[in-house]
Amino acid sequence: MKGILTTFALGLLVLINLRAAEPENPSGLSIFAGPGYYAILPNKILLASKLEPSIRPDGAFIKWEMVSGPGDVNIERPDAAVTWASAKVPGKYKFRVSVSGNAVGGDTVNVNVYPAGSGFGNPLLPGMFPDPHILFVNDRFYIYATSMETEAGAYGHASVWVSEDFVNWNMKLTNWPEFGKFGGDIWAPDIIRQRDKFYQFVTRSGSYDTWIGVADDPAGPWRNLREDNTAIVSAGGNAGRIVPAYNMDAQPFIDEDGQAYMYWGWSESMAAKLTADMKDIDGEVVFLKGTKWLPGTGELPQWLAVDLGESLPISKITTNPEFREVSYDYCIEVSEDSSNWITLVERIGNKENAGEGYIDLTNGRGRFVRITMTECDGNWAGLYDFGVFSGDKKVSLNKSAWASSTRGDGSEAVKAVDTRNGPKLEDFVEGSYMIKRNGTYYLLYSTGALHDGSYSVHYAMGNTPLGPFTRPEPNIVIRMNSEKTTKGPGHNSILRYNDKYYIIYHQHNQPHEDGAGVFRQTCADLMEFNDDGTIREVTPTQTGIGNLKPLLHQESNIAAGKYATATSVKSGSYIPEFAFDNNNASKWCSLSNTYPQSLTVHLDGIYDISRIETSFEYPTLAYKYRIETSPDNKTWETYIDKTGSFPTIVSPQKDINKAKAAFVRITVTGCQNEINAAGIYELKIFGNLDPAMKRVKNKNSNPKK
């Protein structure tokens, strides 16, 4: 491959591969499109490309043109690698970029353009904030989420985002759990108000346990609720059957009578009442997927035996393994004395997935029945239910049982023959969230794999907080949309505001897919109900829901849609103009973590500047930086200097000063985590055009990149 030309539209990323037919004459183009960017009027459309060094810029000629669309489009610099385009009519547009000279070819890209007033765009927040929880209290909106702080996807500091209109969000760190001193990464915070206190439920990785903090204010300061500084559920702890990876994503719910509940789990779905002081589980844990036997090791074979209490004719045996999409090999034997065994069933080389479970019709007799699992398609053995029938009667219920091994308390062999066998919520993976509406309880949860497009939200309904729950058909709340402009929407919370319901969720940071598939961003959409009380499937949007209260700030961002340059660029996916496109999915990133790195925007006129807001790539980290202004891109004056020490961590960084300038330059001199390069989601500049000053033109200010 001779080189790569990366082409963007504010809705789609396009990779155009230039394959060399001859060393100096590349030809043969193929196009790869990944959705993500868009434009909401009156914002402009950004069309961008970047030639690799192997293609001579002085010998490559680029041309942009509109192929189709519902209205006319003005492409400002059709022969430049980076250009803004303006449309007046919303709809789907197709653009073509052509390359000639020493690189020949071209292809097309589609762009979604939305009408003004249709929203302010998803994602809501700049940065990687999965597992979002929404809270509305004291006339403000609060979002708590997992944070991520490196390109590799390392988890970060605890924080809270606050907004008075649901559009303008401000972040600050919270004191608990304390980063680096908590004994693990901080995941999936969930906040609830009970009387005059706020309670934060949070997962700690490593031991995968759930902790509870308490505060008088939703922003803290927080302290551990339990005086002995322990988790409410932990590995081997006080929640019945505990497997380390299960105790995560806890969500508290308070019913109308004031009773508090907790829902949590990974792969296993658990729920329980809480004591009045919220410090402990009150009573037993309910396993919403059913109880099951789990062996203590993944080694095979593993067996489970049941004593029927007397010798009985055996007509049928049902086997309900742990995983539906897995095939199992096993044999079933009977015995009168638990020493001499006769084979009744033998499934070897089985290719049939477990699904709803296996049924084996038999004609035998015995007091003891044993199943030995010999192959589980790469998984551990495990049984929700092992049912032995004599005639039409299930004779194995609540009988004595034992096994080759067990994983711990709550995983014993008797769990496969109790009355709470499963699975009930068989597709549950994580992210429990309970709401109540018109007397019905809705348990929302995520299923699929968080790393890909299978991740989605489903739900079940019940008449009591602890079930039993049934899944209506269909039972999908939100999933990847048909045009794939969203990917993997999941791990949600729900906001009820003015009798409307909104789902707050995360989706992948398309089209970048950074952080090995774990980078996800916070989004929001309207959620509605059908007349029969079921949830209408939500189509995730690029526009979001807009402001829910009057906008706090309505000034114009004078840097939006302007051209920019930078000292370096990581790739064509992170060009300087992405810091000026009013989109929290896109950003400018420098080539490396070598500092200093500068980003300069040409305002195309002299402006009286009053405020500058900077949303850095990792909001929960501090960056050292300096902002300067210039009338001519030659002489510079300092607007703000924060290079001496790391400033207080907030997002966006708001710098208020007065300046008269046509150019603004931010120079980043370091990041609190030194492995990170410079990166900015949005650099917003507020001010007014100076009517006494003419527009500034500089042939070097808008280079054809």
Image (cartoon, rainbow, N blue to C red):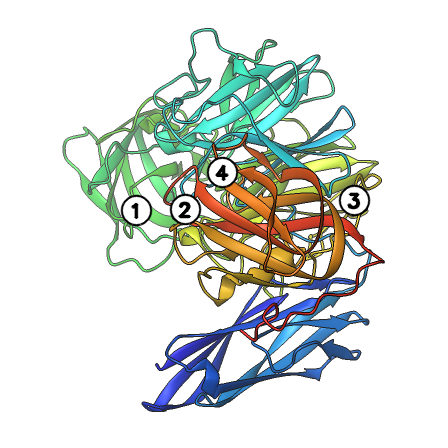
Q: Earlier in the sequence, mark 3 or mark 2?
A: 3
Q: Residue 622, how many percent across, how many down?
A: 49, 36
Q: Which residue does the numbered mark 2 point to in the structure image?
A: 676
Q: Check the picture and name the quadrant holding the N terminus.
A: bottom left
Kind of residue indicated by mark 1:
Asn
Task: Give amino acid for label 2.
Answer: Asn
Query: Which mark, by number, is residue 547?
Result: 3
Query: x and y percent of residue 470 in the render?
Result: 61, 40
Q: Nearer the viewer, mark 3 or mark 1?
A: 3
Which residue was labeled with disc 4? 643
Mark closer to the chain start, 3 or 4: 3
**Is the residue marked by circle 2 packed among few (<14), some (14-19), or many (20+) residues within 10 Å?**
many
Q: Secondary structure at mark 1?
A: loop
Horizontal and vertical percent position of residue 223: 52, 14
**198 or 173: nearer the viewer:** 173
The foreground one among 391 and 145 is 145
Residue 114 left/right relative to 348: right
**Mark toward the viewer: 1 or 4:** 4
Report if the CB atoms under discs 3 and 1 are less than 8 Å apart. no
Dot placed on the residue nearer the N-terminal end, 3 or 1: 1
Res. 675 image quadrant = top left
Q: Which residue is mark 1?
A: 379
**CA–CA distance in space, label 3 to label 1:** 47 Å
